[in-house]
Amino acid sequence: MPAVLKCECNICEESQNNTCITDGLCFTEIIKKDGKISYSFSCLNKAQFLPPEDIPFACRDQKYGVQCCFHDYCNRDLLPQLPPDSEKSEVAMGGYGTSLIAFSCVIVLMLVFIFFVCVRYQKERLRRGFRSDIEANHENRIPLMDTRISELRNCTTSGSGSGVPLLVQRSIARKVTLVECVGKGRYGEVWKGSYYCDYCAVKIFSTRDDKSWEREVEVYETVMLRHENILGFIAADRKDNGTWTQLWLVTDYHPNGSLFDYLSKTTVDVATMYTMALSIANGLAHLHLEILGTQGKPAIAHRDLKSKNILVKRDGTCAIADLGMAVRYDSSTCTVDIAPNPRVGTVRYLAPEVLDNSINLNQFDSFKRVDIYAYGLVLWEIARRCNVDGIYEDYQLPYYDMVPSDPSVEEMRKVICDAKLRPPCPNRWQSQESLRVMSKIMKECWYQNAAARLTALRIKKTLAALGVQKDMKI
């Protein structure tokens, strides 16, 4: 068989002079269409042989109406006969080469379709299984990756309790998958994320708020900060996709959301009210506490405490979040570390001394007292939703009836500093012992004179003692 064949071709382009060149064979095909018989001359490359590396089966059986040969222009003299069943068909064979290619394409398309159906089914099955695993794990709170994250948190050789090493943080952050957006604020967005079989929260800062992100990461990495009533820090990373940069902060996920969200749709009983109040005071006391020593912890003030920055855990306790405005105190140098952050605290929760600019920024106790004032307002929000004998108040923000929904500093200053007003305590609170005690504590938190306010430690001890007296498990 010659390496290159020249064949007669009456279906080729005119520029080819009725000739086709091939490394395979020449063929002639008889075609019957609309009652007329014609002959098609062409060639077939070896790559189109079916079966491969052999003489095509159409050349070996006359029922296809095709004859093949292997010499230059040999197909000019071939006159194949119509197949036996050609009388029953308008078209005996619509071009062997074309039919073969069409048949191959159909087979390939069918295989591709089947492949994609199988892949889609497998992905859907895995997705349903993944969701089921996550829900099951969260029901009993012993997920596989929860253990792994706990191990990562404790993998520092120093035992400092300041979080996982930087490289491990980045490794975790880059394996987190965003599931759904659960909140938005002035800083950016909060997403529910998944890390293998566990949920986490991903706070995504906008690049214009990078100072808050840097400060929050810096504070979360403070030695000995980790505490059950402070939001658990997992990782931080910068995610650059070439167009913009995202600043990620990965923390524990609490499905109940913020205290603001929780109280907006749910009432609480007396025991839960005490539990929430004590857990917030417990976290605040830990922040304010300075631990001396080589593995010590500086005193920290939050500066933006409010119900939206407190998360409700599954057991009803709370965890303080959003440390982007926190300040630290270095007792060895007696200096207050205030980050260069353009953000100010939420105006509605600002203490009188902040509103009238009388606060002493060089004294760290001033910042702790600002936190206590805001804590008193949070207690007021919780107490309003305390259901005693079926009686409770609708959820409202502090000063809802005195200032607009988005008050200015000047509007708050007139109410708090000039008029010296505070959120009203309903009459029913005086007739119920637990609410009467809570109202007394909150009033001692929002004194006009900052120095007269309770400390977080004093509040913690008072609430803990009340819980014991009332045989409450707090």
Image (cartoon, grey):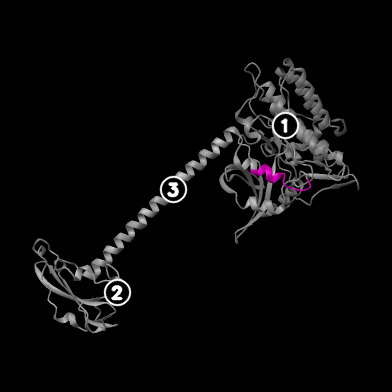
Q: Residues within 10 Å of mark 3 (few under 14, many from 20)?
A: few
User: How far separated are the C-alphas under marks 2 and 1?
Assistant: 83 Å
Q: Nearer the viewer, mark 3 or mark 1?
A: 3
> What segment is highlighted magenta in the picture?
148-158
Task: Please identify the quadrant where the C terminus is shown.
Answer: top right
Q: Which residue is mark 3?
A: 122
Instruction: Give x and y (percent) for residue 242.
Output: 60, 62
Looking at the rendered image, the disc whose residue lies closer to the viewer, 3 or 2, is 2
Q: Earlier in the sequence, mark 2 or mark 1?
A: 2
Tell me if label 3 and label 2 are in contact, CB under 8 Å: no
Which residue is at the front of the view, 55 or 156? Answer: 55
The vertical placement of 245 against 122, above or below, is: below
Is 456 on the left-hand or right-hand side of 20?
right
User: CA–CA distance between discs 3 and 2?
Assistant: 38 Å
Q: Quadrant of the N terminus?
A: bottom left
The answer to if 152 sits in the magenta stretch is yes
Q: Secondary structure at mark 3?
A: helix
Residue on which the image places disc 2: 46
Report whether 219 appears left or right of 77. Answer: right
Q: Amino acid at mark 1?
A: Val
The residue pinned by badge 1 equals: 378
Q: Position of residue 2 (x, y in %)?
A: 27, 83
Residue at 26% x, 63% y: name it: 103
- The numbered dot on residue 461 is none
Res. 20 in view: yes
Give whichever of discs 3 and 2 has the lower sequence position: 2
Mark in front: 2 vs 1:
2
Near mark 2 (Cα within 10 A), the count class, few <14, some 14-19 or many ≥20, is some
For marks 3 and 1 on the same chain, the one whose residue lies earlier in the sequence: 3
